[in-house]
Image (cartoon, rainbow, N blue to C red):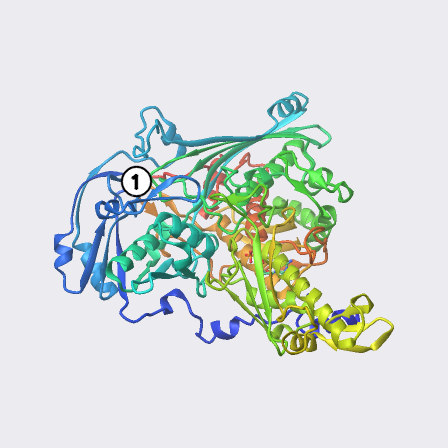
Amino acid sequence: MTSKALDEIKIGGLGSSRKRVEDERFIRGKGNYLDDVTLPGMLHMEILRSPLPHARIKSIDTSRAWEIPGVHLVMTGEMMATRNLAWMPTLSYDTQAVLATDKVRFQGQEVACVIADDPYIAKDACEAIEVDYEPLPVIVNPEQAQADGAPIIRDDKDGQAGNVIYDWEVGDPAATDRAFAQADVVSKLELHYPRSHPSPIECCGSVADFNRATSKLTVYMTTQAPHIIRAAVAMVAELPEHLIRIVSPDIGGGFGNKVPVYPGYVMSILASILLERPVKWIEDKTGNLISTGFARDVYLKGEMALRKDGKILGVRMHTDADHGAFFSDAQPSKFKIGLMHSAFAAYDIPAAHLTARGVYTNKAPGGVAYRCSFRVTEAMFFQERMIQEAANDLGMDQAAFRRMNFVADDDFPHRTPFGFLTDSGQYAKCLDVGLKAIDYDKFRDEQKEARKRGRLLGLGISTMTEPLGAGNSREYDILGIKMFDSADLKVHMTGKAILRTGAKSQGQGHETTWAQIVAHELGIPAADVTVEEGDTDTAPFGMGTYASRSTPVAGAAVAMVSRKIRAKARKLAAHLLEVSEEDIEWELGRFYVRSAPDRGVTIQECAMAAYSNMPDGLEPGLENTAYYDPPNLTWPFAVYIVTVEVDPVTGVWDVLKTVAVDDCGVRINPVIVEGQIMGGLTEAYAMASMQFITFDADGNCVGSNYMDYLLPSAWETPGFELHSEVVTPCPHHPLGAKGIGECAAVGGPAAFVNAVMDALGGTGVRNIDMPLLPDRVWEALTNHHDVSGAPPIRQD
Ligand code: CDP
């Protein structure tokens, strides 16, 4: 290690595996989560949810609930309507019922709420509310939604003739047709990426506190994007934005679940305004699993035009997306199906065409970016499943087929067939590292030998680059608000500092890593930098944290604001050293005179001078703000390779080894990066093997508790071998960093599924839809057919 790198490690700078500072309070039980917020005079809110997925509301009788001692308020949709709050806009330019007025449209929809002295009284009072429902036919998948005579779910919307929300397309259909006309082989695949729930340990909730005397509304809230919420509250509730303060305290996991605006937030705010008392709402686990922010639920089909030597000539893809009853995805406005069209970005494919259709069904709103950059998980899953099937159809080796079609190292910047610009990567090198780590050739030999003895071994590869770090602001906005981010740095007189950003950590360790960036740029030890996020009264405006955008955007803003501070500190140094600025050099934490390196001043001395000895004409103080609008997304690359053994008698499969090679450019904190990868791989394994939240034919949500919706514990989770040898700095990020938070969750599932499918090679089975529960694998093996598609789940 160079002495410069050592100096950096000493102060906890770039590349230091500094321990997470936030863990000091988390592991001592001193975190401040939403349920820890208790205000004087606080009341509690509970929500009555619909037991039926589709029904007309004939009447709601709240009289018995009002009579229960301790009840302060009972709200229904009718009452919300008198304040024009029965419906709210969604982040995708649709509308969503806050409390149902005309119909309920999914099981678990909000029908009424009660505010009482404690949550138990409020829950009892909810049960005393009588709702008379007239059941309506139920739709649980896109096929039913588009069938002739299907009931119209959104009959509240003028001109809504059916259940289709949008049709969207991207790519070049004519060039794609030409590619298919030239193909020697056409490979096809159809699959369902099932609905899943991000399922953070902490549920969603809010504590709304309206102060009539000051007209100020403070809302403590589990949100990943406090400033977007402030803007939404200002617009929906027509309250002055400067009198709204959103505080997002410690968050117990978000994974995209805490980006949308939920009815519960709106109700607690209105209740606080009406009662002039703080009102707390926090979901129970079933409430969270049944009603908030589902993800995925897309049906994907496509085909690949191939030359016999293995060259991919073109790709066609179609997606039917099940959005549930309200189109409330939090995603860039321009892209109806998120960044689905980032598919195949790692491969050099001349032509591609994607069509997408979104439909309403009788399910809770879906489409949140569950640990992904707006549908890239579905895109990469389809991509890597398709690549495996195409290689098999050609009779080519999986690794060789990928290597042959990768974008080459010297082919950057590369325009993908769907129009993205990827800018850097060493794809083949990453694959080589992965193959060596799994001992590819040896495993293939063992696989052949094992097969002879009836043992089913399989190896699955997933290789992908994904777009992380929206904006740029030219193309990316949510509700017209451009996607950039911010950092605000105040260096105090003694050289200690406070940094605030527009991002909001939910466990990713920003308090640790942002301070490392300041240390790297200014030489102030990371331990001397406090990082604060999540309070709209103090943090600079930003778009929050999701889609692994923090490091690419807010992290870049931290570097930029530090550089602004350094530029001013240079003027102070010149003044203190009595030389002109041009004669000053910088090294980590210190300015010195070029011609006399021993004559220097530290950054801390400059900070003191900013408040006590500034030159004439220089504004006092050492603080600044930077807004960063990235020129492009960052494009990390990853190789995930998994080996498995499938038991032919039971369909149970065990992971033998998992290898991950992630190239996320420069790593700010290597240990945090590894934690992100391990977490992502665990979620990938969960999706592939057990996480199943679905619906029966009657629209009942199956999986609304942890008895049915399985999350892997440490016991089930396999071990992972991580590799960090390949580092391709991002050419436009000030530190060369690329996002990492979600890569493994995005790319991982295909590696597990490909491994099981590889073990089943030769049986004629082309696809088993996730999760690959043992009974599905057994059915495919025994009956030699695909096991695809859900919901509805089978009734037999
Ligand atoms: O947006 P989110 O925080 O979920 O994802 P991210 O930007 O990929 O960062 C996740 C965590 O990994 C943060 O604490 C980052 O600072 C850290 N990280 C890093 O140390 N080096 C990178 N190249 C990327 C992320």
| Residue 331, above or below 491 | above
Identity of the residue drawn at 36% across and 54% down: 288
Q: Is residue 135 left or right of residue 678?
A: left
Q: Which residue lies furthest to the front in this view?
A: 616
The image shows residue 369, relative to residue 174, as above or below, that is below
Q: In which quarter of the image is residue 90?
A: top left
Where is residue 221 drawn, in percent x and y?
A: 39, 60
Q: Name the residue under label 1.
A: 105
Image point 54% across, 59% down: which residue? 679
Query: Viewed as shown, does residue 199 lie left or right of 667?
Result: left
Q: In this view, does 223 lie above or below 350?
A: below
Q: Which of 190 and 270 is in front in this view?
A: 270
Residue sitting at x 74%, y 71%: 588
Secondary structure found at label 1? loop
Q: Position of residue 372 (x, y in %)?
A: 53, 49
Residue 63 % position (x, y): 12, 53
Q: Where is residue 170 in the image (x, y as percent from the top left)?
A: 57, 31
Pick the residue in front: 454 or 765: 765
Q: Quadrant of the N terminus?
A: bottom right
Look at the image and tell me whether residue 509 can be seen. no
Q: In which quarter of the image is ligand 1?
A: bottom right
Image quadrant where residue 516 sits: bottom right
| Amino acid marked by disc 1 | Arg
Residue closest to the far right = 595
For the residue pair 465 and 37, the one nearer the viewer reads as 37
